[in-house]
Amino acid sequence: MARPDEITDDELIGYLDGYLADEDARRIATAIDADDDLAARAAALSPDMAALKEEFDALLHLAPRSLPVAEAISAPTVVPANAGTGRMTVPWWPTAMAATLALAIGLAAGFGLSPKPPQQDWMQAVADYQRLYGPETLGGPALTEQQRRDGLARAAGAVDLPLTPDSVAIAGLDFQRAQILTIDGAPLVQIAYTDPDGAPVALCLTRTGGPEIAPRSTRYGAMNAVTWQTAGVGFILIGTSASALLQAGQADVAPRISS
Amino acid sequence: MTQSHQDAVRDGLSELMPRLWRYGIVLCGDADDAGDLAQATAVRALERAVQFTPGTRLDRWCFTILRSIWMNELGRRRTRQGAGTVPVDDVDLADRAPGPEVNILAGQMLTKMMRMPEAQRETLFLVYVEGYSYADAAERLDIPIGTVMSRLANGRKRLQAEA
């Protein structure tokens, strides 16, 4: 006969759930009958599982009414981005849905539900990278005017956009340098600035092929950001600077750097 | 995409929505998030209908989608909170007090379940509410069967213990 201390909790679970072969099940049943400690262990593992299932099945009656998915999927409408839910930075779904269901392809991009631009979630990658920037990052020997111009020219070529020191100038920010990054194999340009306090600010852009998205303010952790998309290019202006400064910067630079 | 794939998914989805929402409650601990998650799942299921084989289990297929959407969202939330890149499955969110919706139900087992660590709660839910075998749960959660069983054991002890 098996010694009770050889029977593990895992075996008891398997026994209680009916997974064991007949012979093993009989062995354990006999052991439980013969040993009070083992019986106590089995009891400790035996809550009322039927009650559990019942309570969870009762939950089903509280589920929201089935949504007219079929109608929604055939007639998508665009909902203004960031309706200021206050609940999450990027709403998963439009919040005010009563009689009608609005499928927001723009919002759905947060889930990758949109017609999958090649660089899904590229803004999050930018935020993760920008989070590493501190006052020292751009504090080395300044590039010459020519070096900055050359760096921008390379970046302009990579994304086929008119990027020059004049076109990327943002009131209130000092342009430092441009670099060409990559996301999912596609070029992503980062244009680095410092704000009046010396804090790093980045304007990042990449060709997404996505739809027009009006500028919206958002936050990534401790950083403010303004994001927008136009002519198939996605933009994000991000930094720890005040949101108002970034919004003004967006309005300033956007018309000059679109293709 | 053949019409039969779309139809199979669309027809099955209406009656599946409550169970998607319920799984959402288990994962998110919040009825609003669960609603959002269920609807996002439905949309993606319809978009990917061509990948579904009519006649196979639509519920399991949709559960996979739902879970993957939630895991991505969790990853995003953790990154925004500066939690770094810890693998989502290895970290249990802090025990969450059940939201008001769940409290209203006042079911003892339900309340205890919602106070459990997320990984334990999900494992018990899949096996004891949705009827997954240990092996299916292990595959769904991408963990060894032994881990499934120890989560079940610890979860059952917790349910059985005095509140």
Image (cartoon, coloured by chain):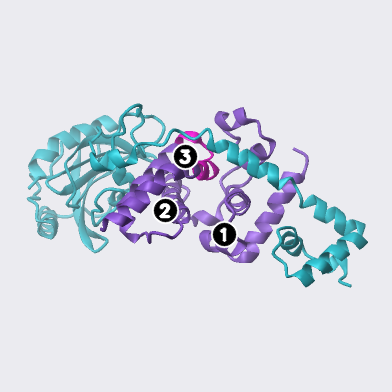
Disc 2 element: helix
Q: Can you identify the residue that label 3 sits on?
A: B34
For chain B, give the colour.
purple
Determine which residue is flagged by label 1: B137
Q: Which mark is residue A105?
A: none
Q: Amino acid at mark 2?
A: Ile
Q: Is residue A20 magenta?
A: no
Q: Residue at x 61, y 30 (%)?
A: B105
Which residue bears the numbered disc 2?
B65
Q: In whole angstroms, how far apart are the C-alphas of marks 2 and 1?
A: 15 Å
* First to last magenta residue range: B22-34
Chain-order first, disc 3 or disc 2 = 3
Q: Amino acid at mark 3?
A: Ala
Classify residue A236 as left or right of residue A30. left
In the figure, the cyan chain has which letter?
Answer: A
Is B101 left or right of A207, judged from the image as shown? right
Residue type marked 1: Ala
Give the image quarter of residue B16. top left
